[in-house]
Amino acid sequence: MRTYIDRRLRWLIAAVVAMLFSTTDAIAASGAGSEEIFLALGWIVVVLLAARIGSAIERLGQPPVLGEILAGIVLSGVAMAGVHWLEPMRTSVVMKFLAEVGTIVLLFQIGLESNVEQFRKVGMRAFIVGTVGVFFPFIGGILVGQYLFPEQSINAHIFLGATLTATSVGISVRVFRDLGVGARPEVSIILGAAVIDDVLGVVILAVVQGLVTTGVFDWWNVAIIIGKSLIFLIGAIVVGGRIAPLLARWMAYLSNSTTMKFAVPTAFCFLLSYIAYIDDLAPIIGAFGAGLILDQVYFNIYRAPEIVEKIEHEVLPYVGEPSRTRLVEILDQYRLHHIEELIQPLAYFFVPMFFVMTGFSVDLRTFTSLHVLWAGMLITAVAVAGKLVTGFVAGRVHRSIVGWGMVPRGEVGLIFASVGLGLGVVTAEEYSAIMVMVMTTTLMTPLVLSWLLRRKTPAM
Amino acid sequence: MRTYIDRRLRWLIAAVVAMLFSTTDAIAASGAGSEEIFLALGWIVVVLLAARIGSAIERLGQPPVLGEILAGIVLSGVAMAGVHWLEPMRTSVVMKFLAEVGTIVLLFQIGLESNVEQFRKVGMRAFIVGTVGVFFPFIGGILVGQYLFPEQSINAHIFLGATLTATSVGISVRVFRDLGVGARPEVSIILGAAVIDDVLGVVILAVVQGLVTTGVFDWWNVAIIIGKSLIFLIGAIVVGGRIAPLLARWMAYLSNSTTMKFAVPTAFCFLLSYIAYIDDLAPIIGAFGAGLILDQVYFNIYRAPEIVEKIEHEVLPYVGEPSRTRLVEILDQYRLHHIEELIQPLAYFFVPMFFVMTGFSVDLRTFTSLHVLWAGMLITAVAVAGKLVTGFVAGRVHRSIVGWGMVPRGEVGLIFASVGLGLGVVTAEEYSAIMVMVMTTTLMTPLVLSWLLRRKTPAM
């Protein structure tokens, strides 16, 4: 009892000291935008801790990612409830950047863990799944738009359909990672299909935007977009696959330090993300490709981490069987995972930023209008059904897992919606309903997927 | 010969493909400030690779940090020579943020490596060194200002003096780290003195700013600033030292995963950086304090990394002497360094951002005016001499190492100068001369320090 009071007192002292420090002017405030830089230091503390507290949801058998998103939603509520210090986080370029890097690092890791061969094997199926997963939600979105908002133009309905096309693959993929089943064929199919629906989504947006602004369907523009996407996918993988080992070898020639081992793959990941961006694709596609390429070429070039080398040279020769075999096994495992180990702390830092910020972007007030809620639920139903259909064309895998893996919608849908809002074809009400759809699919997917996977995967 | 051409051809193909991708509009461009986010992905590639190429200067016996700064200067030249894509990096909030986090992570590492006891031992000496190192450059700056710019007011000279006070400790500390002599008593003295001169610098700036704007010397303001700094230094270390273990234990109760092991110290580092900032101190002081605190409390709470546990349980019991002793030694070493290992990749990512951006902020055109150059050289001489004096009050350590460790001036000096520019007491010419001083001291220090350390430290 005594220690408990003691502990609370200490926290109180801490809180009071923190209050004392609540002025913020002088040095750092000079220079453009620099206040945001320093505020972000505080936000990072809140996001990192909120993510870890939220992920304790694991104890209730739920995937940590759900806890991170919920922690973000709670923070959003806290900000609205009067903690104004958190409010500017919504528009902060720095926080958006950290969240973006979070998705990049996550997809890079997935790429590193993925096997190119397996990915090639599912290529055709992923293409079909992606195409079907764009077609049905698009058509479904147009129809539900006509039913819900009959007073609006056909262009508005087409826009609504477009917002339902792109999968926010980061959320599903995180669930697979959390449960340690990242190597399942369903994951490759979902990732491949997400690349396809991202490309198709960009094409649709360009077409719809052209339709709304010029009233003309521009075939030429569509051809250019498809062409650029193809150049990226083939170019990045073929050319990148050739450059990466050369670059790594040249860098290894400059120095074989761990710094270099870290910098080359990281720079390569950001390079492909950037090339994807200037090619009008989502940067995460580039990051995923970078991981896929490096997975193959990297291990032949660099040496093992220090602890492995030390034990190998100084201890292993004197160890007898059967411990020797086990020791070699442990060391080899560790040697192979070294790049992942080097990247992992970046993931610890950046990945929660994305999921907490996803939750933070939720506007709880959306839930107060009944018509918005109703429209949101109906759109969600169409969004879910439209992607579940894809399971039937995925071949001999677990259909529901593929289907649900494609369900989450995220930032791409919201970006489409905000473009529509800017053009005046999407109303504020419709935007809120789309927001409800994004939230619902984001929160449902981890729950359903982890339930499906636990039911179907034999316990470890 | 054939492979050489082959290799060049591949690079050519890569370059052409990259050119093809040079349009940048569609999706990503929507949303406020988001273009910067995606451009930054490309800048990160350039900065990471430039840093690694620059650090190959190590082969010539020079410290890597010098190579990173030089790489930044080269990039700055490249940007001015017509690669406009790099130009917005100068004002990018995201890049400034990455550089700031770079200094924070670096000082956090130094704190983790520092020994609190050793730091306490040098406390008084650090205080004297810091005070002397503010006094002489301040007076020297006023005098050289009167000589160089006699037409200006005394306030302008006082401002020039103020810009010479604050040490940019990151550069010296990096040299010590690069050479593996971070545990020398000189390092503790320099770090302690840098805290003191940062506090004094803030006090002087507040006083000078008050003098210029109101014409009155405000004792009350000075007292508040000194009080707040004291509260931070004592509060952070005493209260922080009590909270950190509680927080860590509570977090460990939620989950004992590596994610948690990473998140708690990282969040604590950012928290203390942020508190330092709202207390009008440099965030790096908070980061250093966080490292110092965690160094003591952390190891008792968390378990060893996986590889250590595996080998310990499955192999160690079956290993005979003398290999057993050696294995235990290697494992213990690795266990102790686990937090540093977890933070290290963050350092690989963020730290080069700071040093390359420091080089990148150099405006090469500064060197074209003879009067500016002359003024810059004279101010540099005063800046160097004013800090070298501190070696004589540092007690029984290597005097020149302490003195030179205090020489580099960086962003704080430039911030002071830009405040003066804003108030109209510092002229554009004077600002350029201060820039020359910052550049010269930044580039000289690594050279001189590594020479001094190599001469005095017995070869490993």
Image: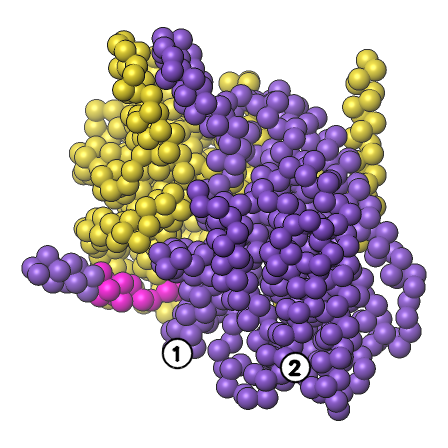
Chain colours: A purple, B yellow
Task: Examine the rendered structure and indicate whether residue A80 appears above or below residue A17.
Answer: below
Residue at x 39% of width, y 73% of height:
A78
Q: Residue A20 magenta-drawn?
A: yes
Residue at x 42% of width, y 74% of height:
A77
* Image x and y of residue A185, in percent: 64, 45
Q: Same subunit under labels 1 and 2? A: yes
Q: State the residue position of label 2.
A: A430
- Residue B438 — which label? none
Which of the 4 image quarters holds residue A28?
bottom left
> Disc 2: which chain?
A
Tag 1: amino acid: Ala
Q: What is the chief secondary structure element of the magenta stretch?
A: helix
**Dot 2, crowdedness within 10 Å: few (<14), some or many (≥20)?**
many
* Image x and y of residue B71, in percent: 60, 34
Find the distance from the CA under tag 1 to the CA under tag 2. Answer: 25 Å
Q: Residue A417 magenta-drawn?
A: no
Q: Earlier in the sequence, mark 1 or mark 2?
A: 1
Residue at x 79% of width, y 40% of height:
A235
Q: Which residues are magenta?
A: A13-28
> Disc 1: which chain?
A
Specify the quadrant that holds the C terminus of chain A.
top left
- Residue A81 — which label? 1
Task: Examine the rendered structure and indicate whether residue A311 appears above or below residue A436.
Answer: above
* Image x and y of residue A233, in percent: 77, 45
A208 left or right of B327 in image: right
Q: Secondary structure at mark 1?
A: loop
